[in-house]
Structures are given as structure tokens and as C-alpha cells.
Amino acid sequence: MEYKKYSYKKDGFEGALYETGNSDDRVLIVIQGLKGLELPGKYASLFCEKGYSALAMSYYGGEGQKKNMRAIPLEQFQTACDDLKKRGYKRIGIYGNSKGAGMALLAATVVPDISLVIAASSFGHIMQGTGKASEDPCKAMVSFRGQDFPYVEKGKLFSDFVKRCIREKNIRLLYFFDEWDKKGTEENEIPVEKIRGDILLLTSTHDESVPAKKDAELLVKRLIRNDFKYGYKHINSETGSHNLGYFPVNNNMLPREKKFPEECQKAREETLALIFDTLDRWSV
């Protein structure tokens, strides 16, 4: 296994490349919802051990990068792809979990070199970014070449969340993001029809963090409306939780993980098998 480190200030993106050293022309960009390279590095190392070169990337929070999820520049993914192409890779995919899944889809909408997207537990709309207005004139969570994206405004989100908790007689993170998601329109959906490659959407019926299943169904309808010419598939788990990634985080905060730990772990293993099967079949 060969290893190369990149920094945002020097190279235009922050990452760590794990190379197999074989002649395979495929490489997988790996991103996650958390800051830093520790978690995506675990996945990149795992993929590399299985014979797939992988680039672990962190798209915010590092030196020179945006500190908040506001106007995160998607061109850093193009810069990464340009470097990978110089290294001889011809097929570039991207894989993300949770917030990283939505970012993977968004990156692929503006980077034509990405020919495969694997998104697990993704959001479906572009949301208003966090942070102060002084940080960037763009208000959405992402930007491209200084241009803003249509986004779902927060509005009176917290009060909507509180009302939902009272109505449901429960407190769940899902309510917060579901209420926000309900404000979305076709205009601020992730424009997945712009992706130039295959898409695999992975969700769970029992996602207690984001309405990923509903959003995946919404994105599939968008692909159908736009006569998407590449392959796409939505696979939903009836046993897993929001944490479909092989290296789960914050399981202690998810009721389903506490109640059905063995079922959730099995769902992760099944999801990983689906991902490897997708990589094996990758031909675009």
C-alpha cells in the first residue's frame, strides 16, 4: 500500500491517497460527514486492502478550508480529480455517508470526471449553510466558482421542531431535519440529473437522523423525469439504522442501534457487500 498526503493550502484539496500499486485504473474518493481525515482514512484503507485505490478527503474544517458548512467550494473535488487523472486514473468514483453522501452527490453534479456515486443515508435538498453572513456572500451549504445554489431556508425551524416533538410526544433528531426538508422544493433538490455516471442510493427505513429514504425516492423521481441516461439504483435496508457505514459513529445516540445492535451491524456488513459488488461491476 502506497500513501500520499495532500493539504488544502498547497494542493487545493485536503486528502490522503491510498494506492494499491496494481494496474487498475479505478480510484474512489471517500468523504464523510465529520471534519478531518481520520474516518475517511479508515474507509480508504479498507478499500485499498480490497484492491481499490482510494482518496480520503476532508472538505471543510482543515487549514485554509471553510470552518462551517457554508459555501463549501465544490471545485476542490475537481482539483482532486485533476490530480488523480495525472496519476493515471481514468475512472473516478466517490462514496460518502450521511452529510458526506449529500456532498458526494453535489460534487458529482459539477465534476464531470466522477462516473460513479455511492451515497449512503443522504439528504435530498440543498440546505441553507451555517455560519455568519460575513463568512461568505453565498448562503447555501455549498458553492461553485463563487456562485450560490438554490437552498432551503431555515426559517422558524427550531419552533417547528419543538412543535413536532410535542405533537409526537418524543424528541428525535429526525424531526429537526424532516421539518427542514419539508420546506424544500424541486428548485433546491440536488440536481442529480447532471451527474455523468452511475448512482447508488443506500437508505434505511429506520433512519432516525435524516429522511434519507424519502429523499432518495424523491431523487429517483427526478432522474426519471429528466430521462437520466446512466444507471441508478435505490436500495433500502429494513434492518439498519442511519449508520449504514462500516465504521459507525455516535451509535450511542441512535435508539435503533441500542435496541437492535446485531441487526444494525448485519445491515452494515450487507451494505459494504453491496458497495464492493458495485465497484466490481463499475464499467463507466
Image (cartoon, rainbow, N blue to C red):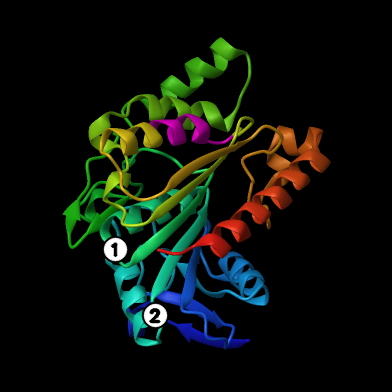
* Label 1, label 2: how far apart the Cα atoms are: 13 Å
In the picture of the structure, the residue carrying the numbered disc 2 is 84
Residue 38 occupies quadrant? bottom right
Q: Is 188 placed above or below 137 here? A: above
- Residue furthest out toward the right: 262
Q: Which quadrant holds the N terminus? A: bottom right
Q: Which amino acid, mark 2?
A: Leu
The residue indicated by pointer 1 is 111
The 10 Å Cα crowd at callout 2, few under 14, some 14 to 19, many 20 or more, is many
Q: Which residues are magenta?
A: 209-218
Position of residue 217 measured from the top left corner of the image (x, y, whole percent): 44, 31
Bin the neighbour count of mark 1 within 10 Å (Cα to Cα): few under 14, some 14-19, many 20 and up. some
Q: Quadrant of the C terminus?
A: bottom left
186 inside magenta stretch: no
Image coordinates of residue 115 in percent, x first then y, are: 38, 62
User: In x, y percent, where is residue 54?
Assistant: 53, 74
Front residue of this view, candidates 57 and 193: 193
- Residue 268 seen by the camera: yes
Give the answer, above or below, for where 241 lies relative to 158: below
Most frequent secondary structure within the magenta stretch: helix
The residue nearer to you, when weighing 195 against 133, is 195
Q: Where 15 falls versus 118 (above or below)?
A: below
SS of the residue at dot 1?
A: loop
The residue closer to the viewer here, 127 or 46, is 46
Residue 142 at what x, y percent from top left? 30, 53
Q: Is residue 211 magenta?
A: yes
The image quadrant that residue 91 belongs to is: bottom left
Q: Earlier in the sequence, mark 1 or mark 2?
A: 2
| Residue beneath the point at 36% across and 64% down | 114
Q: Is residue 188 above or below residue 73?
A: above
Horizontal side of 240 relative to 202 (left or right) equals: right
